[in-house]
Amino acid sequence: MIFKNYYKLLDLPKNVKSTQDEIKTAYRVQAKKFHPDVNIKNKAAEERFKDISEAYRILSDPIQKKKYDRSWNNYVGKRMHREMASQREVRANDIVNMFFGKNIATKVVEDKTPLKGENIETTIELSVKEAFDGTEKKICLASADGKKKNILLKIPAGIKNGKKMRIAGKGKKGINGGNDGDLIIGVKIVDSGIYKMVGDDINVKLYLTPWDAALGSKVAVDGIDGQLSIIVPKGTQNGDKLSIPNKGYYKNSKERGNLVVSAEILIPKKLSDEEKRLFTELKKKSSFNTKNIVNIK
């Protein structure tokens, strides 16, 4: 069994004065780097994570840390200075006894564990239309030597907001022959054009003339996957909403949210002489008075 250098495992200098806060911070950094969830199916990283946990267990206990420091200095540290060139085995049965209760020969060795490279994380923005239809995006990454490389990413139709996509082997280089890290891309769907996402619903505005809103009419609205013909009820008010089921964003492979159409009535800024005459005549003849109307629906 190897008499392990706990300070080296936590990437700390060999210093008995390391504080508990420094030890805790170092442990968190190394545990995150070698955690099995990050290094999937990497047995070497899994063993390294166990060693890191063992190192933290000993060094985070002031009494155990004191014993470890004293033992290391007495039995290993002094000999390492004399024998570093030859890396000869160091017999330290009584030290191992302290922690494991057995007489086992120990040696100090250089760590050559293959380690997976670090992952690279980035985010891409997609319009509602791009996310709905699916698209391709080019991602530009800078390597350690400053060179740039482009990666073509295929976005599947109906991808969810916040989804993370993983491309194996496109992260940072592995260490000691370990696998390269992965490229992890987070997806952010942003409101764009005429479409706005609210959950699985897609909201669009429908611009109406005053007469279409008052008289009712059949109009076309731009759905996410093509135009739809809808009936605007008589007396439609500004801000009224019409919900069309199963015409929104993908909930799953068989279901979609709603297309929510919001009415917005526009008043013409310029009128022809005939339009002015008609509006004037309407004003004279109409009995409609907004002051007498409450809670118009």
Image (tube, rainbow, N blue to C red):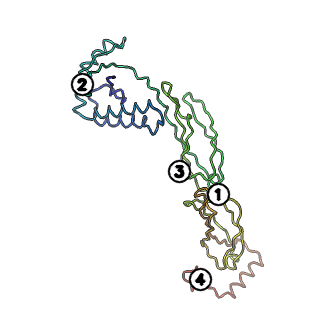
Q: Position of residue 172 (x, y in %)?
A: 52, 32
Please tell me how crowded label 2 is: few (under 14), some (14-19), or many (20+) other residues with Cα within 10 Å: few
**Occupied quadrant, residue 228:** bottom right
Which one is nearer the viewer's eye here, 229 or 289?
A: 229
Which residue in the protein does label 3 denote? 162
Which residue in the protein does label 1 denote? 193
Mark 1 vs mark 3: in front = 3
Q: Position of residue 75 (x, y in %)?
A: 25, 18
Q: Position of residue 11 (x, y in %)?
A: 37, 29
Which residue in the protein does label 2 denote? 97
Asked if the residue under mark 2 is in contact with the one under mark 1, i.e. CB atoms within 8 Å, the reply is: no
**Occupied quadrant, residue 3:** top left
Please tell me how crowded label 3 is: few (under 14), some (14-19), or many (20+) other residues with Cα within 10 Å: few
Pointer 2 or 4: first along the chain: 2
Which residue in the protein does label 4 denote? 290
The type of residue carrying mark 4 is Thr
Q: CA distance from mark 2 to mark 4?
A: 93 Å
Q: Secondary structure at mark 1?
A: loop
Figure quadrant of the N terminus: top left
The type of residue carrying mark 1 is Gly
Q: CA distance from mark 1 to mark 3?
A: 20 Å
Q: CA distance from mark 1 to mark 2?
A: 71 Å
Which one is nearer the viewer's eye here, 7 or 86?
A: 86
Q: CA distance from mark 3 to mark 4?
A: 46 Å
Pointer 1 or 3: first along the chain: 3
